[in-house]
Amino acid sequence: MNNQMEYSPTIVPYADFNAEEDGKTLRAAMKGFGTDEQAIIDILTARSNDQRQEIAFWFKNSLGRDLIDDLKSELGGRFEDVIVALMVKPDEYLCKQLHKAMAGMGTDESTLIEILCTKTNDEISRLIGTYEDLYDKPLAQHLCSETGGYFRRLLTMIITGARDQTGSVDIELAKQQAVELFAAGEGKLGTDEEVFNRVLSHGSFAHLRYVFTEYKNLSGRTIEQAVNDEMSGDLRDAILTIIECVQSTSAYFAKRLFAAMEGMGTDDATLIRIIVSRSELDLGSIKSEFERLFDRTLLSAVKSETSGDYKHALCSIIGSA
């Protein structure tokens, strides 16, 4: 599946949008005794983020109230997390997720990988600008203080925009790079991680598809098999994420969602982040991939792992179609 062809949102701009009407409905849903949670879900999961920003602007301008503050005071738990995530601008939301992954003791590397290794140069560039606006600190500086070794080097190359975004493919170079990757891994004792970092952080996704095909022709094994054998830890996870996204970003996120719901307990933070952040991009494709890979619908999986208004909000974003 072509990475560039996966645009299939579950949330699109609402056709008969009226910010004032929606604002008044939301105000009524939160005014007085009790809260009409369903009214909040019905509006906010059926409007694009730009439209939600217009509602928030109307709220501030006409009522002198902060819509996010009002929602926070009326809602709670995971349901509040979903609704607030919907209300934050997409780039700002992901920057807050990155900051949270690096704040305090320890670092949530899997979140850093999920956000940074799946993005285009343009998307990374927007995140860098937004991050500095929010935290008055360069994203690169924060990342360098929280990560190390070849993993840090790979993330640094990604956020400095090393990847070719033209989508160009150089067949001869792809053959040469397949040989370089083989020589850096399976073809020697030990692993030259620098070669893997350079090739996987620079090539366009279309080009890397050729590299991986050439690699299989050369070694008789897939690039995933080689990376699993040659690497470990965060660097391996980051490299495998890039490889998966080269083949299908939607399949990568479908697997992330499955892992978030597998076994005992649910990784709600990952569930919310992916469903909200991909809703206006490719959540429709992710749903299809989820069903293809796991023989059950994403909707049924989410229903069995969540409850109450939290469940209703997520299911409304996912959509039944």
Image (cartoon, rainbow, N blue to C red):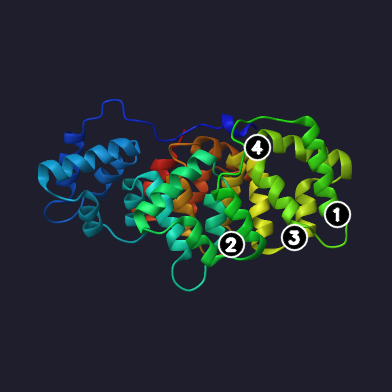
For label 2, the crowd category at 10 Å Cα-Cα, with few meaning under 14, some 14 to 19 and many 20 or more, is: few
Looking at the picture, which amino acid does disc 1 mark?
Glu
Quick one: label 2 or label 3, which is nearer the N terminus? Answer: 3
- Residue under the image location 65 percent in, 57 percent down: 237
State the mark number for residue 231. 3
* x and y percentages locating residue 54 in the rendered image: 24, 37
Spatial separation of the CA atoms under disc 4 and disc 3? 21 Å
Is residue 251 rendered to the left or right of residue 102?
right
Tell me if 99 is positioned left or right of 212 in this view.
left
Where residue 232 sits, quadrant-wise, is bottom right
Q: Earlier in the sequence, mark 1 or mark 4?
A: 1
> Is 257 left, or right, of 62 in this rendering?
right
Q: Nearer the viewer, residue 269 or 134?
A: 134
Pick whichever of labels 3 and 1 is earlier in the sequence.
1
Q: Residue at x 26, y 45 (%)?
A: 40
In the rendered structure, find residue 269 and report the number of the disc placed on it: none
Q: Which residue is mark 1?
A: 186
**111 vs 146, nearest the viewer:** 146
Mark 3 vs mark 1, CA separation in Å: 11 Å
Q: Earlier in the sequence, mark 2 or mark 4?
A: 4
Residue 240 seen anywhere in this rendered image of the structure: yes
Residue 292 visible in the current orientation: no
Type of residue at label 2?
A: Gly
Position of the N terminus by quadrant: top right
Q: Residue at x 18, y 47 (%)?
A: 29
Residue bearing the label numbered 4: 205
Q: Give the residue number, with chain letter if any, for mark 2.
A: 263
